Amino acid sequence: MAELTTLARPYAKAAFEYARDSESLTEWLPQLQLAAAVSRDSRMQALLRNPEKDGPQLASVLADVCGEQLGDAVRKFLGVLAQNRRLLLLPQITALFAGYKANFEKSVDVEVVSAFDLADDMTDKLASALSTRLERKINVHTTTDPDLLGGVLIRAGDLVIDGSVRGRLNKLAAAMNL
């Protein structure tokens, strides 16, 4: 997996820099996400792996499946990927692009898992506190998991804050086993 990310990085960086410089970051990400989703389809992957098809054909087929939602710049980018036989890297390129975009915009997606539905004001307070701590704009996504028993589990990139009852019980059990 790390090798695919290594191969995808220069393409993601080039796409990000082009989109940033042309002030079209918000347009590029959904287009890349669409192309990546289409490229994950098993039939499309079989086609993209076919050595008998040349780059322009593959880029054209992928762009045609995506339809009108792809702009000219992204279509040209798909052409470059196809020419270098890198269309299968679209999911990794898209993930890296999204990371570069979030870093540039100083925003982070935060997943908050709680045992019960959180009230809107509690979610807002949590987002405000995380925004202060992380010095970033926070995009909160909440889910519920009754197995937590109580409290919350917060994931923001590499940062994990486990304030759940289940997490505390697991720590206590680990401490007692020592």
Image: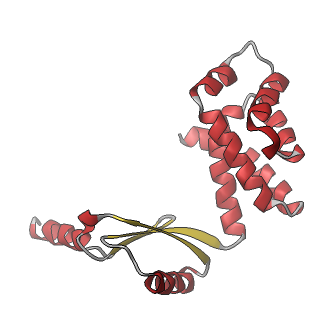
Which residue lies at the image location 78% right of the left edge and 27% below the top edge? 61
The answer to whether residue 41 is above or below residue 146 is: above
Number of marks in picture: 0
| Residue 30 shown left or right of residue 19 in the figure | left
The answer to whether residue 14 is above or below residue 113 is: above
Residue 6 appears anywhere in the view: no
Q: Residue furthest top?
A: 52
Which residue lies at the image location 51% right of the left edge and 64% below the top edge? 157
Q: Nearer the viewer, residue 27 or 101?
A: 27
Residue 136 rendering spot, x and y as whole percentages: 61, 78
Which residue lies at the image location 85% right of the left edge and 55% below the top edge? 18
Q: Nearer the viewer, residue 103 or 50?
A: 50
Residue 35 rendering spot, x and y as whole percentages: 70, 41
Coloration mode: secondary structure
* Residue 17, picture quadrant: bottom right
Residue 80 rendering spot, x and y as whole percentages: 83, 35
Of the 4 image quadrants, the one containing the C terminus is bottom left
The answer to whether residue 28 is above or below residue 36 is: below
Residue 36 rendering spot, x and y as whole percentages: 66, 41
* Residue 176, picture quadrant: bottom left
Q: Nearer the viewer, residue 88 or 72?
A: 72
* Residue 45, picture quadrant: top right
Residue 30 appears anywhere in the view: yes
Which residue lies at the image location 26% right of the left edge and 75% below the top edge? 150
The answer to whether residue 64 is above or below residue 94 is: above
